[in-house]
Amino acid sequence: MAEQLKDFSLLHSDEMILNMGPQHPSTHGVLRLKIHTDGEIVSRIEPIIGYLHRCFEKHCEFLTYEQIVPFTDRTDYLAAMNMNDAYALAVEKLLEIEIPERVQYIRVIMAELQRIASHLVAVGTFGLDVGGITPFTWTIRDRERILDLFEYVCGARLLYNYIWVGGVSHDLPEKFIRRTLEFLDYFEPQIEEYNQILTYNKIFIERTADVGTLTPEVAINYGCTGPVLRGSGVKWDLRKTEPYAVYDKFDFDIAVGDGRMGTVGDTWDRYFVRIIEMKESVKILRQALAQIPDGDVHAAVPKKVRIKEGSVYSRYESARGEVGFYIIAGGKDKPMRVKMRSPAFCNLSVLSEIAEGWMISDVIAILGSLDIVLGEIDR
Amino acid sequence: MNSVIDSMMKIFGSLGTGNSALGLVLAVVIAGLVVFTIMAVMAIVAVYFERKVSAFMQDRIGPMEVGIFGFKGGKQFWGGIGQTLADTVKLLVKEDILPKEADKKLMIMAPFIIFIASFLTFIGVPLSDGLVVSDFNIGVFYIMAAGSIGVIGIILAGWSSNNKWSLYGALRSAAQIISYEIPIGLSLMLVVIVVGSLNFGDIVAWQADHRWFFIHSPFAFIAFIIYVIAGVAETNRTPFDIPEAESELVAGWMTEYSGFRWSIFFMSEYANVLIISIIASIIFLGGWLSPLAIFGVHVSWLEGPLWGLFWIFSKAVFFVFVMMWFRWTFPRLRVDQLMYFCWKVLIPFALANLIFISVWELIF
């Protein structure tokens, strides 16, 4: 024994490498995190992605412009309407066609409902990540109502294929506006319930405030967008800064983190931005539902979309941030190249920057606050 | 106070077997079987209860409405009982997996050590006046000691699984249980100082003569609060469930266990919850005394061993409910916050409490 102890290599302590994922309850899909730990303290994180790679961009080169729409559903499956909308927006920009106003309004309504649904999942799973189970069931219960509304509109509950190039697949059903207003009346007080059970819970604040602070400079350098960027106090929301569709007609605010519980840009701020955004979305929805005009829901798009040479980059504010579609048209009915800018990819890349030096539990909380969807990261 | 073993020995003696050794063995076996049955049944009932509580809070449908054998559950109070039974059967018939790289002997042994710890604890816990398997005159100390054996099983389970998550869970759990035993011990010590005895029977008798402990003095009330908080931590339940922490450590030290071995963990966990609750009701809430005793009213037909059993379980179930309420309400603490809370909040308060209660006892 004594001789063994002389050999200090036996007593040598080393970092432990921990593979979190791809099968792990809190990596939100099939993300794998290679974590170097010293006890509970995390010294290095390497996110490893690609487990859900389905060659979306390559597929697009073999599909007509219309056929790509259902594929966009599968990228960000928690905000499929947003992805439909973002893609349709890009192709319409390339086609240079005017979209009927009713379609614009329907798209705004769908996008905002989808934003609420997506943020509900984000808030709920974030609750799960920090150990509270009840908020998750509550948010999922309310998201169910939004899915019911979507089902009422287009028959699908998760992957809609509703927003098409040049319009939407069909008009809103008769009672949709009334049912949506009923939902909004039900939903607004619910946000306060989430705040009571989770947001202002002392333990929750202890777990999230001052943890994983993302400074505005780092956020901008990494290309973070959406609630992650706004959580750091940067007022950047494409709906306001670069309005598309009819967003310039609505009165709403950009939710930004203000460091109410700790420093600006901490995990709590990123979480709370989503809560405020849900309230703002409700505001937009109420205005849109009141103003929606009558009219046709199909623009004058040729039966077969065929675009001459040209390219376009179109950006769109999805629930997770800026979705960009860069499309190069090759003069055929199929695009020559489609590149999608994934917001969650940029948001995830900041993880190792802000989560190193914290504990394993904090890494989970920080990852949860980034609200990633692997379908979109891997595409 | 009579113990069950003593009573049974007396009965066997009166039957004229004459062989006291045989009588002792019989008595111990019967008592052991009864305790085991109580633990098993309690685990099933507690799971059912927990499902119901969670269903109330979370709009869960299954635990409210599942029936059994074509017998509709509906929204009746028995709705969901089918789920519990199905769960029990599933756990018993599920494949028992031992990982290839695991230390098999230790891995098989670990659940039993944990089980034995709760089993041993149950032996010293009185369920009513005279209804205790073995009446120790150092009951409080015995329960503290027997309860801490479980942590060995947890460390063994975590280490032998040969899984990094299990190891994390085991180390967290060991740190947590050992730390939180101190505030529990200190708050029980306060009662022992006042009563001057470690025997549960004496403690309840003192409360019958004087006051229940949670209203005995401000310090006793603080000790009561400390005991409840530390008790929740001791049983590894939310918000102190960091050893299991399903969103961080998958399932902590239980990650590699399945089937019957896992259900033993489960049973011990709920047994521990029950033990902590029963001790809380004995030490601070007058044990088997009827609630009217708070006001000094003694109704003779509300007392006696059977009523005592009822009262003690009512009080214990209240605590169990509070623990479940916690579980479905709170997020989880971080491991350093947990340690901070124990060593820098609970223990200083508990220590100060001990000093103050000694002064209080001197004055009054």
Image: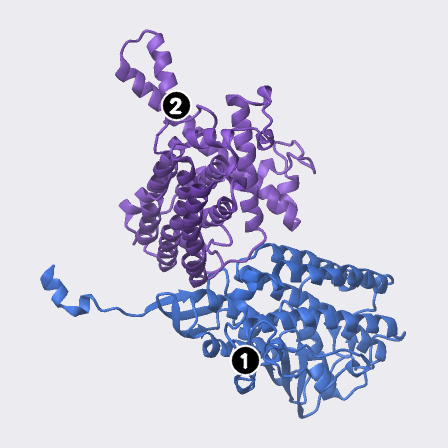
Q: Is residue A75 above or below residue B220?
A: below
Residue B358 locus on image (x, y percent) = 41, 45
Judging from the image, what secondary structure is the residue with disc 2 in? loop
Discs 1 and 2 carry the same chain letter: no
Callout 1: SS = helix
Which mark is on residue B3? Answer: 2
**Number of other residues with Cα within 10 Å of mark 1, as a class: few under 14, some 14 to 19, many 20 or more:** many
Residue A264, percent from left and from top:
57, 78
Chain assigned purple: B
Q: How is the image coloured?
A: by chain
Q: Can I make out residue B262 in this image?
A: no
Point out which mark residue A346 bears.
Answer: 1
Place residue B250 in its image quadrant. Answer: bottom left
| Alpha carbon separation for disc pair 1 and 2 | 68 Å
> What kind of residue is marked 1?
Cys
Residue at image coords 10%, 61%: A2
Front-most of B195 and B225?
Answer: B195
Residue A177 - label: none
> In the rendered image, which quarter is residue A135 located in?
bottom right
